[in-house]
Amino acid sequence: MDLKITVLGSGTSSGVPTIGCTCEVCRSTDPRDTRLRPSILIRHPDHNIVIDTTPDFRAQVLRAGIRRLDAIVYTHGHADHILGLDDVRPFNYHQGGRIPIYASRATFAIIERVFAYVFDNRERKTHVPQLDVNLIEDAPFDVLGLRFEPIPLTHGKDTIFGFRFGNVAYLTDHSEIPESSLDRLKGLDVLFLDALRRRPHPTHSTVEASIEIARRVQPARTYFTHMCHDLGHAATEASLPPGIFLAYDGLEIDVAS
Ligand SMILES: [Zn+2]
Ligand SMILES: [Zn+2]
Ligand SMILES: [Zn+2]
């Protein structure tokens, strides 16, 4: 089944440009240097599935022209991956029905705390997101006919999920990828990897480390994401080995299977 992926955001938690910064990348006129918070849309043929709802979710949905949302899959509960959840309400009104979300127990515990008003079942005269919660574990699950395989990732002191679906893997927010997870990444057409910057960071991968991961996994194409303002698009991409690219907001990738 063919998939179309749209990169909704390729930036790190603070986005690029970064508030208050006047560095060369934050002042760049190259549209690929404007990065909203990290998320992708998967169109599978008639269904729209997003991975994560960032603080930029509303702007991302409008920019990408997404008129219907069929499911949300969460990687983890950090603010840059969940804070746009309230903006699913217009999808509830327009398309009717609840929207299924998929999250690990630990991730859902954060979502439930941050968005307590969504889950308190109180009678109210205003609308809150209407969601069906599906708790996931480290086992494959089906989202509207598309099989997702969680890929455990080390993100600082936490273990979070990346996902493989078809011959695509979306791995954002990793400081390390366990060997047992690398074993699940054979035969990929497209691999997304975290590449925050060149300097080491306690919870994120670097350009060098992710080049090494791509070299080991050997996908047909690798795209780096979750990038900060240290990495100007054109200059950084020109320095990468063949087959490795920087993702950018609005990038569309067709994947045949
Ligand atoms: Zn993040
Ligand atoms: Zn900057
Ligand atoms: Zn994170």
Image (cartoon, rainbow, N blue to C red):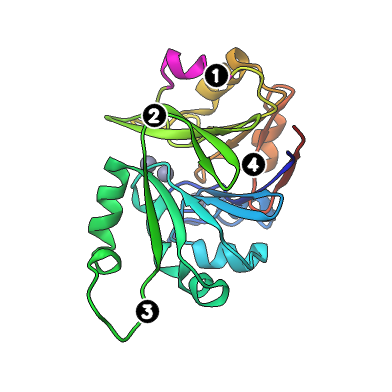
Residue on which disc 3 sits: 127
Q: If you read the primary sequence from the N terminus, does the residue marked by circle 1 or circle 2 appear first?
A: 2
Magenta stretch encompasses residue 183: yes
Residue on which disc 2 sits: 138
As helix, strand or loop, the secondary structure at mark 4 comes to: loop
Tell me if residue 76 comes above or below residue 138 in the rendering.
Answer: below
Q: CA distance from mark 4 to mark 1?
A: 16 Å
Residue on which disc 4 sits: 247
Q: CA distance from mark 1 to mark 2?
A: 21 Å
Q: If you read the primary sequence from the N terminus, does the residue marked by circle 2 or circle 3 appear first?
A: 3
Q: Position of residue 248 (x, y in %)?
A: 64, 47
On the rendered structure, is 205 left or right of 108? right
Q: If you read the primary sequence from the N terminus, does the residue marked by circle 3 or circle 4 appear first?
A: 3
Q: CA distance from mark 3 to mark 1?
A: 44 Å
Amino acid residing under circle 2: Asp
How many numbered circles does the render carry?
A: 4
Magenta stretch encompasses residue 156: no
Q: CA distance from mark 2 to mark 3?
A: 33 Å
